[in-house]
Amino acid sequence: MCAEALWVEKYRPKTLDEMIDQEEIVARLKMFVKEKALPHLLFAGPPGTGKTTAALALAHDLYGEDWRRNVLELNASDERGIQTIRERVKDYARSLAIGDVPFKLIILDEADNMTSDAQQALRRTMELYSRATRFCLIANYMSKIIEPIQSRCAIFRFQPLPKEHVIKRLKEIAEKENVKYDDDGIEAIWEICNGDMRRAINTLQAAAALGKVSRIAVYKVIGRITPTEVREMIVLALKGDFIEARNKLRELMISYGVSGIDILKMIHREILNPRSGINIPDTAKIKLADTIGEINYRLVEGADEEIQLSTLLAKIALIGKEIGYS
Amino acid sequence: MSIPWTIKHRPKKVSEVVGNDKAKETFLAWLKSWSPKSKNKAALLYGPPGVGKTSLVYATANELGYEVVEANASDVRTSQALKRRIFRAATERALFSSKGKIILLDEVDGISLKEDKGGIDAIIELMSISRHPIVLTANDPWDPRLKSLRSLCLLIEFRPLKKREVISALKRICEKEGINVAYDVLKALAERAKGDLRAAINDLQAIAEGKSRVSVEDLNLLGARYKQVNYFEMTRQILVANRIEQARAVLATPSLDYEMLFLYISENIPYQYDNIEAIAEAYDALSRADMYMGRIKRKQAWGLLPYALNMLTAGVAVIKHKPKFKWTKYSFPERLKLMAKMREKRDVRKAILTSIAKKCHVSRRIANTEILPFIKFIYEVDKNKGKKILRWLRISENNFKLIISK
């Protein structure tokens, strides 16, 4: 049996020329390639707008087919702290670039997940090795990157992809893959994923596995992507069964391995999603959304995930009682 | 006093060990299938004091013909001392019995890290070389110091004995001693002991030894039984407190581990508080305490500790909708148990997420929320397509099945 790639990877543009979105950014990156000169870069923007793709395409155009030898890809969320990042950068920067580009490229993805202390340390590392390396930092939120780093980088803001582009791209892929689809199905993907191309293509591939990409197929996918435990947990809490709700929470955290912040996002999405089937008045929804924000804030402050999420469940139970949910 | 009755009447057969039938079964099955190549070379019997952990080991050894080599917390357990005595026993054949030996390390949670330097490491080393089954006992297996040990052992839980079980054990002793003890006395003793048979037997001996008849009045001889404060009791003390000072009193406990206390309180709020208002209020206080702790840890802001501890104790106790006191059974922090149980699954998940992360240029976290669920969906609706994608990601199908199963 042969292997089959995920379409997000299969159809990821390999070169800057292949990138059709973020025209201005791509144009400036092409300039850098032509000059073989590069400042430190900071790519900021929402998920699925092409930040990583642009960084990889830039690397490809700079160094050619064996670009991997000149590029170090790091992910701030996965590396264990700044110490590891420093060590890896140090080892990597020790050797010179191969070929005619006088520097190597370090792509540091999800840089906004670093604490400000770690970012300070990163800043020093950037300075220390700036003769032979360039950094390309990638982040969702610019505001979470400290000023001194921002000031050392050329900043590129990635915009959410426009609807026509997303729809056109999805149809292209569907045709190349010989997938049956109708316009309403593609429209549904757009409604749910908006400008997040990664989510859109993954949704397309999953819906295609059902035979035809229709609105119903798309809803089926989305309904199953969020673990059903999230909805069950909310409903149990609303009904006042705190202990069972907490068991669901533990299942999510421990057997699904979902982080506290991600669970919060899912709860938020479920509560605001009119199709989720959670029937509570809008006033209660607003109150809950606000509580979720408060809990998120506490997590960001370094609080414990299980305790904070249990607190949220207790709040949901309280609201359930106030509105007489049953 | 002559020989303590707890030793004189120690069960000689497995059937004489009262209660905890499931634990007994698990233990026997483990022992009988034990070989030097077993996955779990050691069993960790855990539970509150006096529920029969050590007794079960001796009764089994006696009945099945094992020799027991024991070391316990009162022995000095530097790795040197342990090595000399126990290692030799573990690697040599049994002297007196054909079946072999059981190496019993009693009360491993009594190992203090400072004094018994290397004690835990020595036990782990012992496990790897032992030619005989090793049994450890502990009151609190979730003690962070036992973390590395815990994952190597088969965990067998012992629960407090039921009142009728304590009574039946006491009755057996009375018969053997030829004493006539009123049923109400036995009942009262069982009540006081709260599931601790050793305590009950000691009490019985204190009031009954040398007599032929014991009545309810004799109970007055017994003072209040001193009990070591544990996390359960601390939690109870906090959750039933009505005043700030009552709740804060637990903070005087020496070498209190705040993080443990957080886990116990978090676990048991919904058991002690039965109305949702109270649960929400208590959790709100706990979550604020927890937030202070987060800031303390991240920013080394130790000045915040008093506020954190105040919310952890008084904040959780003194709430608007405090329910009336009722006696409820508390639970071990389930989270610690689950973490230990789920370790294998977590490791496999991490490896799979690492494969996806590499191939798709994302973090494991994004791989978990934005990519894995789609692959799972495809696999579930179309096995063939799913398999092809797994092959592309170089993920084994069996591992994948393990993490998507419940």
Image (tube, coloured by chain):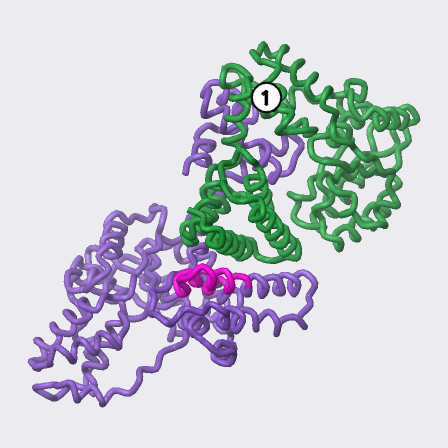
Chain colours: A green, B purple
Give the quarter of the image for residue B365: top right
Our reading of the magenta stretch's main secondary structure is: helix
Considering every residue shown, the one lying at the far right of the view is: A35
Give the quarter of the image for residue B134: bottom left
> What's the amino acid at mark 1?
Leu
Taking B359 as reference, is A60 left or right?
right
Residue A254 lies, in percent from the top left, at 48, 46
Residue B314 lies, in percent from the top left, at 52, 73
- The residue depicted at 43 percent of the width and 53 percent of the height is A242
- Look at the image and tell me in which quarter the C terminus of chain B lies: top left
Residue identifier under label 1: A204
Depicted A23 relative to depicted B220: above or below: above
Residue B335 lies, in percent from the top left, at 45, 54
- The residue depicted at 82 percent of the width and 29 percent of the height is A98
The magenta stretch is B263-284
Give the quarter of the image for residue B216: bottom left
Let me know if residue B281 appears in the view. Answer: yes
